[in-house]
Image (cartoon, rainbow, N blue to C red):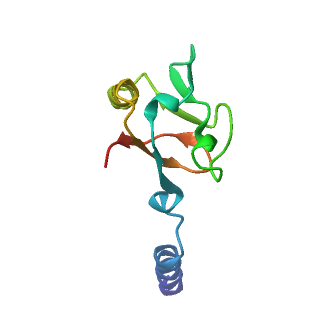
Amino acid sequence: MKSCRYFAAAAILALLTAPKASLAQSLQILRIPDASLIKYAITADGNVYLRNISDFDSTWLGCCQAYWIPLNTDSGKAMYSAILSAAMTHTPIFLYGPKTGGAVVQVGQF
């Protein structure tokens, strides 16, 4: 019984000290100098797909469905609205998301 407790404690300690892949480490900020240059497609699945992100930084994935903003959430609608607002005024916009593809998690002018 005592050895089981030691084994359990060792297993928990190993889990707590093991290196972890952090979500924050995999997310990157991309500055787009003029939001009106973003090409996008809105699809029936409720997403806005950003199609030409690699035009602004070639280390990001290319066309066509690697990055998206979900329009079925309030935050997704707000992010897309921010992009459209910046596009109307030809101002820069920043995207924060996974460089290797996935949902954009923040949009703004920060």
> Residue placed at 68% from the left, 34% from the top?
63
> Residue placed at 45% from the left, 36% from the top?
34
Is 105 situated left or right of 50 in this image?
left
> Residue placed at 48% from the left, 31% from the top?
69
Q: Quadrant of residue 85?
A: top left
**Residue 73 screen position, x and y as percent:** 38, 26
**Residue 1 screen position, x and y as percent:** 50, 82
In front: 77, or 61?
61
Above or below, comparing residue 43 to residue 81 in the picture: above
Is 100 situated left or right of 108 in this image?
right
**Residue 10 screen position, x and y as percent:** 51, 82
Q: Quadrant of residue 106?
A: top left
> Residue placed at 61% from the left, 35% from the top?
52
Above or below, comparing residue 100 to residue 51 in the picture: below
Q: How many marks?
A: 0
Q: Residue furthest front?
A: 90
Is 60 situated left or right of 2 in this image?
right
In front: 24, or 51?
51
Above or below, comparing residue 53 to residue 45 in the picture: below
